[in-house]
Amino acid sequence: MALSITNLKKGTVFQWEGEPFRVVDYNQKVMGRGGSIVNVRIKSLLDGKVLEKTFKGNEQLDSADVTAQAVQYLYSDGSNFFFMNDETFNQFEVPADLVGDSAGYLKEGDRVQLQFFNDRPINVELAKNVPLLVTYTENAVKGDTSSSISKDATLETGLTIKVPAFIKQGDVISVDTASGAYRERVKD
């Protein structure tokens, strides 16, 4: 199915030169005599490379046949991550370099979306925020309880992030998966 360049917007997935891409940033410029050009930053869903590309307004792209399945994260052997579809019990082996930074937010049993292109896993889509247990952090110094002071905390997945001084070992916190930033302490 053809996709007009002028219909692109942030988040649109399309196929270009046989590879699926997602639009990261989009800017359309209308030129004289009704013509237009579209400047886009696109991210390859196969290898994660970000490219800048300019298309003419009359160009057509193919829509990418990207599908998603709800899966459960099982385990990692260091070089691969293993997921299972809860309905069909099919298991998928995903290389660690494809999982990338998402690995720091994955715990065994977590449910995520696994995206496929031509029946091949291409991306792990996490929830916007994930709850993670603080396994190590320095104790706050008495009097340093203002919210502007932060310290390092190691989470159950091995990820280290900055947290407010009042967070202590054993707390469960919500972490933004897009930025890696502390969001809030999770209430019991």
Image (cartoon, rainbow, N blue to C red):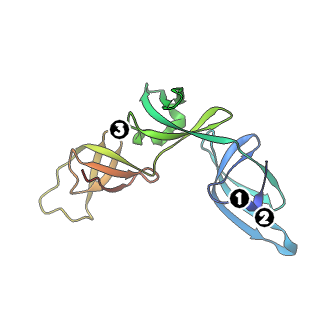
SS of the residue at dot 3? loop
Q: Is residue 34 above or below residue 46?
A: below
Residue at x 50% of width, y 35% of height? 71
Q: Residue furthest right?
A: 33
Q: Earlier in the sequence, mark 1 or mark 3?
A: 1
Task: Specify whether 141 is left or right of 67.
Answer: left
* Residue under pointer 1: 8
Q: Is residue 125 left or right of residue 53?
A: left
The residue where tag 3 is placed is 157
Amino acid at dot 1: Leu
Q: Amino acid at mark 3?
A: Thr
Is mark 1 in CB contact (under 8 Å) with mark 3? no
Q: Residue furthest left?
A: 142
Q: Is residue 124 left or right of residue 139?
A: right
Residue 109 in picture, x, y percent from top left: 39, 34
- Crowd class of label 1 (few under 14; some 14 to 19; many from 20; radius 10 Å): many
Within the image, what quadrant is residue 163 found in?
A: bottom left
Reading the image, the residue beneath label 2 is 37
Q: Amino acid at mark 2?
A: Ile
Q: Earlier in the sequence, mark 2 or mark 1?
A: 1
Q: CA distance from mark 1 to mark 3?
A: 37 Å
Task: Please report the residue visible at 47 percent of the width from the left and 42 percent of the height from the top.
Answer: 101
Question: Quadrant of the rendered structure where residue 18 is?
Answer: top right
Mark 3 → mark 2, Cα distance in angstroms: 45 Å
For the residues marked 2 and 1, what is the alpha-carbon distance in whole angstroms? 12 Å
Q: Secondary structure beneath disc 2? A: strand
Q: Which mark is residue 101?
A: none
Q: 10 Å neighbourhood of mark 2: few (<14), some, or many (≥20)?
A: some
